[in-house]
Image (cartoon, helix red, strand yellow):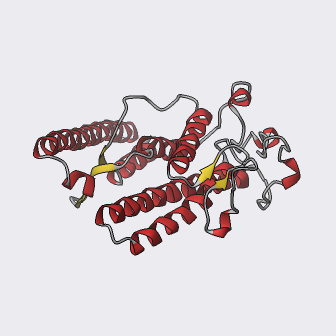
Amino acid sequence: MRDYLKNLASDLLTLEVNTIVKEQTTSSKMPATRRVALLEIARGYRELLVDYGLVLLQKPDNNTEAYPIDSGKFPVFMQWHFGGEYSFKEIYRIAQKGADYFAEKAAKSKNYEQMQEYEENSKLLLRLVKHSSNLIGMFKMRRKDYGIGEDVWPAESLVSEETGHYPPLEDMAEWNNDVDLSTINKIDDLDLTPDQVTLIRKTWEIGTQKILMQTIVQIDGDITNYLTNQFVNLTPELKAIVLNLHNDATESGARIWNMLFKTVSQLAGRAFRKIFDRNG
């Protein structure tokens, strides 16, 4: 009991209050099924890549051209349509190339508004790179835990001749999530650690919307504020609304942390008293 409370208090001391205000935020909750959450995160990433003109989701026909990922040209044809390690690896590679592509266009642009748009596209794609990398790392850890050897990209011979897509990898489903929704509905959910569940939840919450404001409050008192061009360019009325929402959320987060820490401190005090009384 003493070690448990000590670890819990230690975890509380490493927490931070991270408040983000985004464009087009919805009130939807993350799916209770972790596999579905990962599938929807990957789907959102693919939709952004489509919106930016970087990918095709359907096999190109005679009138449409697609390029290899490493060519630096777009669009690229996506072969993975799931929410597992290989799907996020494909997203990672395309988003990284796309970020470089838009950064180069921004550097060459002579139109200020166009340059800003290219820079924002590049930044958002770098977010996809970062979060995809984190999820790939999670799957690599799971592969290691299940005694799976070095990762080898699935053979091209598995690809459907009709669609050009990779099929669901049901034989890897125990540790991976490159499976479709119909398979997800028939198998057990991913057995994840609390840290891995938190990683998925944070990735879900940040999504692909552009961030207006972000404040990070460290428990040691350090406060970091981020203001984006989108926030700076808002009208005074909208700025006031965003600031009020942001400040209320930050204060609520800090208040909840304070309540949690007081509760753990009280529990620890009672536990220690019982231990000492029993020893006495």
Q: Residue furthest front?
A: 63
Q: Is residue 146 left or right of residue 251?
A: right
**In the image, is residue 31 above or below residue 164?**
above
Q: Looking at the image, which residue is at 51% across and 67% down?
A: 101
Which image quadrant for residue 4? top left
Q: Residue furthest right?
A: 157
- In the rendered picture of this protein, how many numbered marks are placed on residues? 0
* In front of the other: 36 or 107: 107
Q: Looking at the image, which residue is at 26% across and 52% down?
A: 230
* In front of the other: 99 or 267: 99
Residue 173: x percent and y percent? Answer: 75, 39
Q: Is residue 152 left or right of residue 235?
A: right
Residue 146: x percent and y percent? Answer: 75, 49
Residue 239: x percent and y percent? Answer: 15, 45
Q: Looking at the image, which residue is at 44% across and 29% down?
A: 29
**In the image, is residue 125 above or below residue 258?**
below
Quadrant showing the N terminus:
top left
Q: Residue furthest bottom?
A: 108
Residue 37: x percent and y percent? Answer: 55, 36
* Residue 216 appearing in the image: no
* Residue 114 appearing in the image: yes
* In front of the other: 31 or 87: 87
Quadrant showing the C terminus:
top left
